[in-house]
């Protein structure tokens, strides 16, 4: 089953930079998302599967000879597998918001980034992402401006050196469904705090409940209710960890009608009540 992945950005930035260290064992199953994704293996061995093509890779740092990066275009189905070797996997994943890319280059819909660029381009991009990671350590209150300058450099370099025209810009049914589920997921992300039900979502997009349910089953392999609840629980956990707000306030501000309803879903998701979860995570955080 191919799944849709919702990308959460770094704060208010239109990107997400992920560092994988020793925790990419076994396959990451086939999935897709709206964001552009740049995968940078620095050590370890594995394979990448992107839109039906398979590539083997050997992670190399900047001082070594061969270099591999992979660029996953918006809505491209992909998966990765790291082989269990003596050398553990280490690398970066940079995800860039697609709507932001459209503000940078309006004709982004008419091009594709090259999935597996040559060594020269790969080495340059690898260097740029390493420098981007370094800017995250900056202590200045203007750090985000520095980060954005690095992002613009990366985008400019890729547009200049690693793109090709799309052969066919006509949307097929699969592409339309991906676009629709992305819109629905974004809508839920913006309105999860409201008294939102499945009928409300279906009405907003002028589709039937059955069609809405089918979209979620085919793209996320879960029900609409399960997805909506998972979004609410995610933000509840954040509030429990980062605030001292009363539990009832956290429940209501995240779309639950009462504390009993929240605790019922917390028990399903975490095998503990909201109160116990707060105590547990804060205890671990302070260790």
Image (tube, grey):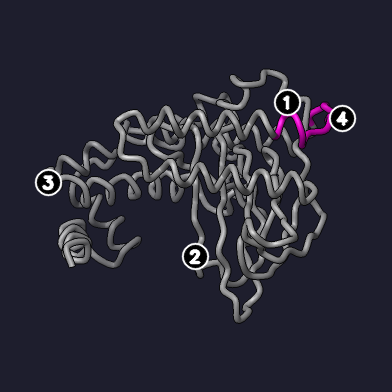
Q: Residue at x 35, y 61 (%)?
A: 269
User: Quick one: label 3 or label 1, which is nearer the N terminus?
Assistant: 1
User: Quick one: label 2 or label 3, which is nearer the N terminus?
Assistant: 2
Decide: few, some or many residues near mark 1? Use Cα within 10 Å; few <14, some 14-19, many ≥20: some
Could you say where residue 275 lies in the image, as x and y percent from the top left? 15, 58
Left or right: residue 177 versus residue 173 is left
The front one of 225 and 175 is 175
Q: What residue would you read off at disc 4?
A: 168
Q: What residue would you read off at disc 1?
A: 109
Secondary-structure class at tag 2: strand
Residue 42 falls in which quadrant of the image?
bottom right
Decide: few, some or many residues near mark 3? Use Cα within 10 Å; few <14, some 14-19, many ≥20: few
Tag nearer the camera, 4 or 2: 2
Read off the magenta span. 158-171
Say if 103 sits above or below 282 in the image: above
- Residue furthest toward the bottom? 86
Residue 53 falls in which quadrant of the image?
bottom right
Q: What residue would you read off at disc 2?
A: 21
The residues bearing labels 3 and 1 have C-alpha atoms spaced at a distance of: 45 Å
């Amino acid at each position: 089953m191919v799944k849709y992945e919702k990308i959460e950005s770094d704060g208010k930035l239109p990107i997400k930079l992920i560092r994988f260290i020793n925790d990419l064992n076994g396959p990451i199953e086939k999935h897709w998302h709206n964001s552009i994704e740049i995968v940078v293996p620095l050590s370890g061995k594995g394979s990448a599967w992107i839109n039906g093509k398979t590539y083997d890779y050997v992670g190399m740092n900047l001082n070594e000879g061969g270099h591999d990066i992979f660029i996953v275009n918006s809505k491209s189905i992909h998966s990765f597998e790291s082989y269990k070797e003596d050398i553990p996997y280490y690398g970066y994943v940079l995800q860039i918001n697609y709507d932001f890319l459209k503000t940078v280059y309006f004709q982004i819909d008419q091009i594709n980034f090259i999935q597996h660029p040559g060594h020269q381009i790969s080495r340059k991009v690898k260097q740029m992402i390493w420098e981007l990671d370094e800017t995250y350590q900056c202590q200045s209150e203007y750090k985000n401006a520095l980060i954005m300058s690095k992002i613009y450099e990366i985008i400019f370099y890729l547009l200049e050196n690693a793109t090709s025209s799309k052969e066919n810009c006509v949307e097929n049914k699969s592409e339309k469904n991906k676009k629709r589920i992305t819109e629905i997921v974004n809508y839920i992300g913006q309105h999860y705090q409201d008294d939102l039900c499945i009928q409300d979502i279906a009405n907003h997009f002028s589709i039937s409940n059955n069609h809405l349910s089918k979209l979620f089953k085919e793209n996320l392999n879960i029900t609409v209710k399960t997805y909506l609840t998972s979004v609410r629980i995610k933000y509840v956990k954040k509030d429990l960890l980062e605030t001292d707000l009363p539990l009832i306030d956290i429940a209501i501000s995240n779309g639950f009608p009462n504390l009993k309803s929240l605790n019922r879903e917390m028990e399903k998701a975490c095998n503990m009540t909201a109160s116990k979860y707060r105590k547990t995570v804060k205890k671990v955080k302070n260790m």
